[in-house]
Amino acid sequence: MSEDSAAIHRGRWAFAALVGGNLALSFGAMLVRFADTGPVAAAFWRLALALPLLLLLAAREGGLRIPRRSLPVAIGAGLFFAFDLAAWHLGILQTKVANATLFGNAASLLLVVWGIAVARALPRGWQALAILLAFAGSILLMGQSYELSPAYLAGDLLSLLAGALYTGYVLLMQRVRGSIGPWSALTISSAAGLPVLLATALALGETLVPRDWSALVLLALSSQLVGQGLLIWALPRFSPLVIGLTLLVQPLSAALAGWLVFGEALTPVDAVGGLLVGAALVLIRLPSRGERPI
């Protein structure tokens, strides 16, 4: 296999990991609703239950040997992520799932804007078309179930804040992944976020210890271990623009979960929205003029 063929092969696996990670993360909102703790306490257990497995994986990866300059960045990413989870989980319970998904995915738009700013050029060719299709598809998916109401204002604002914080988390983790492995980066960021989430849950007077652990265990395994694990592993291979577009897998997956779990009907408009997001993910893999494939 030539060097170019090997690079393309690795890129396919990385893109599959990026999409798969977002698919796993999309079930987080549903599991938070099923947890019988407070919303921020659920975020705490998401990290705490995953941490022992993350430590084992980090030890196999290299034993948490972290360059001194990378440690503050990883800790900073963990703090961004902790506040993101706190805002997101609180928002989920104060607005509709569709609203929380739509505003929580503000990170996708912010990452696309950041990618354009870093490149100092507007997207062209297939990239430009992929961006248009992805956002049009997401609007169609969420537009029917989204509801603007004063009753949901607090939850909508919290979800929007979560999207902005998640943008900072992704950019910091992408930076730190240049010098340390994915499991080490995820272990440090998870450990850094635990005290923040525990203190916040206690300050809010939330129920901390659940009677039924099943939803929290599933949340830790699917969102933190599988979802974040695949995402952080794939981060160094892609621009913020590509990462932002793949986040839009989550509204598509949320619509499918609503159909499978809650019996919410999928309309022809939902189907068209899903096809547009899928087409965008195919197109973003194609090279624009003068560019090599991702």
Image (tube, helix red, strand yellow):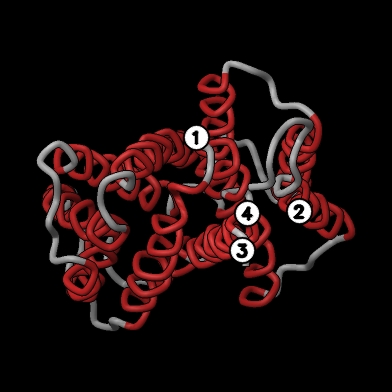
Q: Amino acid at mark 1?
A: Leu
Considering every residue shown, the one lying at the far front of the view is: 2
Which residue lies under the disc numbered 3?
Answer: 9
Q: CA distance from mark 4 to mark 2?
A: 20 Å
Q: Is residue 143 among what the camera can see?
A: no
Q: CA distance from mark 2 to mark 1?
A: 35 Å
Q: Residue at x 86, y 54 (%)?
A: 272
Q: CA distance from mark 2 to mark 3?
A: 16 Å
Do tag 4 and tag 1 residues touch (Cβ < 8 Å)? no
Marked residue nearer the N-terminal end (3 or 4): 4
Observer-nearest of 66 and 146? 66
Q: Position of residue 150 (x, y in %)?
A: 54, 33
10 Å neighbourhood of mark 4: few (<14), some, or many (≥20)?
few
Q: Residue at x 62, y 43 (%)?
A: 245
Q: Amino acid at mark 2?
A: Val
Label at residue 282: 2
Nearer to us of marks 4 and 1 is 4
Do tag 1 and tag 3 residues touch (Cβ < 8 Å)? no
Nearer to us of marks 1 and 3 is 3
Which residue lies under the disc numbered 1?
Answer: 153
Label at residue 4: 4
Seen in the picture, residue 119 relative to 281 is either above or below; the reply is above
Q: Callout 1: helix, strand or loop?
A: helix
Q: Amino acid at mark 3?
A: His
Marked residue nearer the N-terminal end (2 or 1): 1
Q: Callout 2: helix, strand or loop?
A: helix
Give left or right: position of 155 versus 65.
Answer: right
